[in-house]
Image (tube, rainbow, N blue to C red):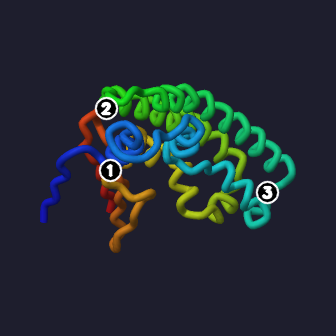
Amino acid sequence: MMRFDLGPTRERQALTQQLDRGRTLKGNKAPEPMLKAIYGSGGIPNPLATILRQADTLGLTGPQADSIATMNRRYVISLDSIWSPVAKYLAALPDKYDKDDAYAHYQRAREASVDLLIKLVPQIKSLLTSEQRRKLPSFVSSYLDTRYLASIRSGTAGASNGPMMFPGGGFFVGGGDRGPGGGGQVIIIRN
């Protein structure tokens, strides 16, 4: 069975629909704070915040929790510096705007967000023991896997929010958009 995905990615369609409200569609334009709340993480959960919420379950020591909290604060501030200008730009778009340019702004910010997390992964992993890493929820583990992050860097087109295991040891990692028009998907299968 073959499946063809024609047209823009769901991610791009969602952004366009959000931006078209109050411009070419009925409704109100989304203000800057709302756009920042919607897109401010690039669609990527904050694994550091989840690790801190799971501190008791993971058995984090005081120094571990302090280090992760400090790292989390820097990560959140960095995300804010990436997404604030993008939210301001998107909120200020005129009624007739360049959809490719709007998506390009979004995509660059998403890539910067993922790149930031990719840089933090080794530090996060070095702070946790192997037992603590095993206790992490699977979705958090996905966001601490640099290969998975690289696969979703440009978008999550047609992908789930994490790796999917198949019987027999097969492994699927959803891919992402490879250009402003949508499309592309990366599939990795390991036996």
**Residue 46 on image: x %, y %:** 61, 48
Indicate whether 172 appears above or below 152.
below
Marks 2, 1: nearer the viewer = 2
Identified by mark 2, the residue type is: Lys
Circle on res. 60: 3
Q: Secondary structure at mark 2?
A: helix
The residues tagged by marks 2 and 1 sit, at their Cα atoms, a distance apart of: 14 Å
Q: Which residue is mark 2?
A: 99
The residues tagged by marks 1 and 3 sit, at their Cα atoms, a distance apart of: 38 Å
Q: Which quadrant holds the C terminus? A: bottom left
**Residue 15 on image: x %, y %:** 39, 42
Q: Which residue is mark 1?
A: 10
Identified by mark 3, the residue type is: Leu
Residue projecting furthest to the bottom = 167
Mark 2–mark 1 CB contact (< 8 Å): no
Mark 1–mark 3 CB contact (< 8 Å): no
Give the residue drawn at x 83%, y 54%: 61
For this view, does 25 lie left or right of residue 8?
A: right
The residues tagged by marks 2 and 3 sit, at their Cα atoms, a distance apart of: 45 Å
